[in-house]
Image (spheres, rainbow, N blue to C red):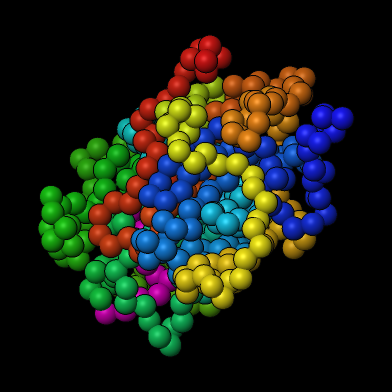
Amino acid sequence: MGALCCRPTPIDFDGEVNLFHFVLLRCVGKGAFGKVRVVQHKQTRELYALKYINKAKCVKMKAVANIIQERRLLEEIDHPFVVNLRYAFQDDENCFFVLDLMLGGDLRFHLERLGHLSEDTVRFYVAELASALAFLHEKRIIHRDIKPDNILLDEAGHAHLTDFNIAVHYSERRMLTGVAGSMAYMAPEILAKRGYTYTIDWWSLGVCAYELIFGRRPFRGRTNSELTMSIGKDSLRFPEDAEQKCSRAGIQALQRLLERDTTKRLGCKPHGEGFRDIRQHPWFRTIDWETLETKTQTSPFIPDSRKANFDASHELEELLLEDNPLKAKRRKEQDISNLSTEMRQMEEQFTNYDFKKMHRRSYYPQNQIVSTMTATSSSGPNSSRPVTPGNDPYAEAQAHVAGIDTEGAPHEYGETERYGGIPMSKMMSEKDYRNQ
């Protein structure tokens, strides 16, 4: 009789999505008021990245508007080169984003490991990201924080734009003036504070491309004021060995992307003509634009799937030091009129989302693996899932999670934390993983 009372309540997969629908796997990131975990959907066995944000900390840091803005924007976005939102929900303590899981790490990690990337690889990534930006700009969305840290690779080596925490809608009738983003990648029109629109994203993409090819940024300064002056005034220079690393057409493309005059900047012609200019530029002659978004083209660079692209210490911290570890909890009955204005705003505006009910498909079937990873939920004993023959548990577990910058508030000058503070320089070897 005693065993009957402990039988778990059946999960209603036809109802609104909640944390009970997922198995909690590895903790792979930590930010100012939230963490990131790999999760597996209990019904479909699909793997995702779970970004969760503590509501009380969110209110304390005055980031409620940012979280709701990010939630709304992600619902509008569905593109093969974006880290797409799959589910969104909340409980009494946290807001949850369930995102596409990227297995290949971010470009900052690969840049620091390799020093620079080949021109062919960078051209391929710029083409994929240009496709994503053209899609966003059609929807009147500016990303505002494009940098190698926010470009994630899937296991096949395709690039995906992530972190929409400071993305905004724009209108040519009322230009934006807020100084937001990571300063080294900011366009001169942001720093001039005279107003800007989508043109800033193409400049940031140019800075990324330059940095990935040459291993250094085009504009530098020891202080914020020096960097501001360099971005606004310094002529664009290339390293002495530039011709060894980049073709003449590539250098011309970088010059066009890093053009201060937005009427001449590559990608900035209105009404979709800018993306047409990019596709017709000689540098992209080898890109098959007709099949690019189907991901049938082979990437020049494929990440090493045998290495873990996240800091394993986050999981130990979750297991040993966390006072309130994440676990699925039933929501309490409450009168939202008694909540603070900010808490009530999250309750009302951070609404549930299910991508399948929106009839959206996954662009990343290669990531949806039946996992053998052990769950680390504190709600009960550890459990495991059966192995699909031929799958490598380590390769599945080393997933690098997408889309995490839990800072919340607009980033004013300076670098933002990568993935809410995941130091990408630390990796766990396959031997260490298997022996833990």
Whether residue 198 is in magenta: the answer is yes
Q: Would residue 378 be visible to someone looking at this image?
A: yes
Between 104 and 24, which is closer to the camera in this rendering? 24
Q: Position of residue 189 (x, y in %)?
A: 28, 72
Residue 157 lies, with reference to residue 332, above or below; the image says above
Name the residue: 47% across, 18% down. 429
Prevailing secondary structure of the magenta residues:
helix
Percent coordinates x, y for residue 161 in the rendering: 50, 53
- Residue at 55% in and 32% down: 26
**Residue 401 position in % (x across, y down):** 53, 40
Query: Would you say residue 166 sits in the magenta stretch?
Result: no
Which residues fall within the magenta stretch? Answer: 194-207
| On screen, residue 239 above or below 188 | above
Q: Which residue appears at 77% of the width and 60% of the height? A: 357
Residue 290 makes an appearance in the image: no
- In the rendered image, residue 193, in percent from the top left (x then y), is placed at 25, 76
Image quarter in which the N terminus is found? top right
